Image (cartoon, helix red, strand yellow):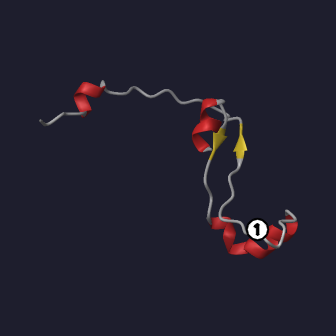
Amino acid sequence: MLLAFHQMGLGAVWMAGPLIAKKEIETLLKVPANLSLVCLVPVGYPDESPQRNRKPVEDVLEFIR
């Protein structure tokens, strides 16, 4: 799911911390009793797109045969 959001140009992050208030969040979001939250994934358009200067794969990967 996170990779699909990234492919669509969206920013997303897996958050487990908010589950400290799990019951309150489930009530707020009206989660049915037979379901349970595992995480929250906020999704949105990033405010910036940092560019990275990556090393070529050949510089960071070595195949050993």
Residue 40's place in the image compared with 56, above or below, is: below
From the top left corner, tell me how far across and down residue 26 is, in percent.
80, 69
Q: Quadrant of residue 37?
A: bottom right
Q: Quadrant of the N terminus?
A: top right
The residue sitting at 66% across, 30% down in the picture is 8
According to the image, label 1 marks what residue? 35
Q: Quadrant of residue 12?
A: top right
From the top left corner, tell me how far across and down residue 62 is, in percent.
19, 33
Marker count (numbered): 1
| Secondary structure beneath label 1 | loop
The residue sitting at 40% across, 26% down in the picture is 53
From the top left corner, tell me how far across and down residue 17 is, in percent.
63, 66
Front residue of this view, candidates 51 and 40 = 40
Answer few, some or many: residues within 10 Å of disc 1's Cα (few below 14, many 20 plus, some between 14 and 19): few
Front residue of this view, candidates 34 and 64 = 34
Q: Quadrant of residue 55?
A: top left
From the top left corner, tell me how far across and down residue 5 is, in percent.
65, 37
